[in-house]
Structures are given as structure tokens and as C-alpha cells.
Image (cartoon, rainbow, N blue to C red):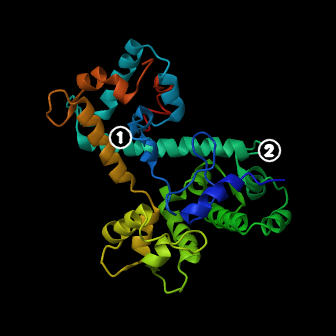
Amino acid sequence: MLSKTTALIFVLSFVGCVPHTHKNKEGNKETVEHGSYVPRDSGHYKEGKHDHEFDHEAVLGSHNVAEEYDHLPPEEAKKRLFSLALKMDADGDKYVDKKELVNWVLKSFKMLTEEEALDELEDEDGNEDGKVSWEEHVAETYGMYDDDIALNQARDSPEELEMLENDRELFKAADLNGDRNLDKSEYSAFSHPEEFERMHQVVYEQAMRKRDKNKDGFLSFEEFIADNHGTAPVPTTEHYTIEKDRFINEFDLNGDKKLSREEVLLWLIPNNVETAENEADHLIESSDSDKDGKLSIQEIVDHHEIFVGSEATEFGEQLQHPHKYIDEL
């Protein structure tokens, strides 16, 4: 039987990292960008074209709500967005400034993580008890129903064995009460370890175990750039040039030509604050009609297609269940 992770492993052999299993919103295993976790805004621009779906989800905090909004008439979308914009306006001055937008988007990211984790938990919760056991995760992800069988079968595929062991470490770290089951609050940390600081040490150790070939506790550029088989790309390629520039200018903070723990995590963990700031800038730039650097409630409503869409995004559920959505924000 072919593993459900075969296609993912094939892709990851070219980017140099085999992470734990992680599903995107379509339920497919997520890939990574040269070893690091995929940032929230990775799909904001597709093939050079702007994708409004990211904006809608960053505002609404829900893939499901954004999809529902897609089918709302424009006037209904505007009406509901007006109520939402009042919530964005934290200080009640009838304007939403960049700081308020950034805080809103960051909370939306947290809600998206919780929604995605809940979807994954429901997929893996074979006995429907609201929790996922290690055995259930292995069965759903690897198609194996006994841990020993899973290990024996995975040994035929070193990449899959590595993924299985990475999952085991992350599962154990996420399992705060040690009962070998992950409830809703614990599962989020397992499925999205990049979003939880308490999981970062495991993420760091897994990356170093794979890449720190000389075991000196640092990553040289050669170790950083190597692919899944330890081979570096040809120096004349665009990929090599881009990654070298990132290594020097984004990650090697002290310029010592190697990455410390802090610098490795800077590479591995997406910067959600920076992403939220960029999204706030984008929303303001796209909707600030009077160019005063902030958005009035009316400007937000007038540009509803940017914030939530409509038959032209999903927010009806937020009004129907305000404690689930709006009050959390």
C-alpha cells in the first residue's frame, strides 16, 4: 500500500526538509519553503496575481466564513461588514488605524489556526471522542494501525520514517497532560507548531538534527542551503543566489557566517507580526480614499469587496454566533 505522504516526500526531496505532517485548508499535506514553515500569506499572490481570498480570511478569521461571504449579496455584505468594522475600531474613534488593523489580523490568524486544527482533529478522531490518540494519527496519516507495523513499514522509506519520528516528538511535546491523546487545545500546537512558542524547541532540534552535519550547534551556509540529500545547488542558479542573500541579510544577524539557535528559528518560524503589518498596509493602501493613513468605517464598507467580498466572503456565521467569532476578536 502506498503511503499518503508519498507525494509530499517527493516534493520535499527538492526543498531539503522533511517536516511533520501538516495539512492546508484543502486538507492536503502542506509543503515548505526551503525547510521553513509556510507563512500565512504564501498564497496572497499566485502566479503574480493578487488573491483576495487571503485578505478576506485575514479579516474574518475563518476559511468557512469567508466562503459563506462569497455568496452574500453586496448590500448584505456591506451591512454585516459595518458591524465588523465597529469591532475593529478598538478605541471607538470611528477610524481603524494601522495598529488596530494589525491587532485584528493577528487575532484572525489565531482563529484560522484553531479552525484548521479542529478540521484536522475531526479527520483523525476515529472514535469521535473529541480527542486524537497517537494511534489514530498514525492510522489516518500513514494508513497503518499498529505502531510497530508503522515503524517497520516506514523503515523501507527513510523519509517517511523521519516524518513519523518528527510527528512522534511533536505529539509528545503538544500532549501537556501526557495521556497520549490530544484534545482541542493541545492539537493546535501539534498541527501548527510554528504558532506556539512552547513547540519551537522541538522544531529547532529537528532542523538541527537533519542539517547540522558537523554537530557544532550552528548552521553554516553550506548546511543551510543543502537539499534533502545534503547536496547544495549549483552556485550559478537563481535559487542559490536568493538563498545566499536571505542567509546573509535576513538570518545571520551578527554576521558571523553561521546561524545560532535564535537565527535558525528566525528562518524556520514565519513572522506573523510582519505578515499582519504588511496586510494592514495593503488594506489601507487599497481602501484609504482620502489618503489620511487610516480607514473610516465608511471607507471600509465602501471597499467591502477588498475586506470580505460578496457575490462579487463568509461572515454571516459571525453575526449568528457572536461569542464564537466577534467576541473572540
Q: Position of residue 161 (x, y in %)?
A: 73, 67
- Residue 210 vs residue 179: left or right? left
Secondary element under disc 2, as helix, strand or loop, is loop
Q: What is the quadrant of residue 245 in the picture?
A: bottom left
Q: Which residue is mark 1?
A: 104
Q: What is the quadrant of residue 107 in the picture?
A: top left
Q: Is residue 179 above or below residue 204?
A: above
Q: Position of residue 66 (x, y in %)?
A: 48, 29
Secondary element under disc 1, as helix, strand or loop, is helix
Marks 2 and 1, how far apart in space? 36 Å
- Residue 253 vs residue 23: left or right? left
Q: Is residue 151 above or below residue 96?
A: below
Q: Is residue 168 above or below residue 43?
A: below
Q: Position of residue 286 (x, y in %)?
A: 26, 32
Q: Which residue is mark 2?
A: 127
- At x 54%, y 44%, the residue is 114
- Residue 103 vs residue 147: left or right? left
Disc 1 crowd, CA 10 A, few/some/many (<14, 14-19, 20+):
many
The numbered disc on residue 163 is none
**Identity, as a three-letter code, of the amino acid under mark 1:** Trp
Q: What is the quadrant of residue 80 in the picture?
A: top left
Q: Is residue 155 above or below residue 99?
A: below
Name the residue nearer the viewer: 119 or 155.
155
